[in-house]
Image (cartoon, grey):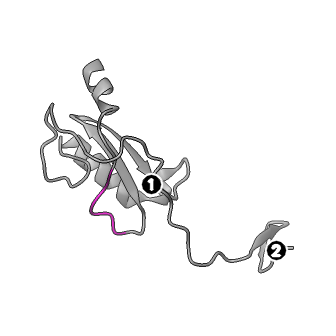
Amino acid sequence: PIFFVSRLFIAGYERIQGITGGSQAVVKQYGPLSFSRIFNSGHSVNAYAPEAVYLIFERATFGKDVVTGNETAGPRYSTSGTTDSWGWRNTLPASVPRTRMVEGHWTNTNP
């Protein structure tokens, strides 16, 4: 297990393919160990990006690569790309509605 953890630092981030619900996610993986980053999600990622969570869970459970789900993630499998996640950024929406909550009700304007 320590071997995989140390090699995970060498693996690079790649975009997870197959997510269609508007979420963006990247993963770095070495062998069976992976680290995923799902953008525009809070601590309840399963509520914000259920499709991404399902794909990652399914691929990891069946020993496949998290990026595509097509390859077997054997002991020498590794993702390629940048080794840190600083280059990956959230995509901001084109327009953000100006709203606020006052006494439990949403209003259409911000002060």
Q: Amino acid at mark 1?
A: Trp
Q: Which mark is residue 88?
A: 1
Magenta run includes residue 97: no
Which residue is found at the position 21% from the left and 55% from the top?
Answer: 68
From the image, state whether disc 1 or disc 2 is nearer to you.
1
Q: Please identify the residue farthest to the top as the structure is shown.
A: 2
Q: Position of residue 101 (x, y in %)?
A: 79, 68
**What secondary structure is found at the residue carrying circle 2?**
loop
Determine if residue 1 is in view.
Answer: no
Using residue 34 as the reference point, say whether residue 102 is left or right of it.
right
Q: Amino acid at mark 2?
A: Asn
Name the residue tied to disc 2. 110
Span highlighted in magenta in the image: 14-20
Q: Position of residue 73 (x, y in %)?
A: 16, 40
Q: Is residue 95 above or below residue 48?
A: below
Q: Main secondary structure of the magenta part?
A: loop
**Where, by quadrant of the figure, is residue 96 drawn?**
bottom right
Magenta run includes residue 18: yes
Q: Which quadrant: the N terminus? A: top left
Q: Nearer the viewer, residue 5 or 98?
A: 5
Q: Is residue 18 above or below residue 81?
A: below
Q: Nearer the viewer, residue 51 or 94?
A: 94
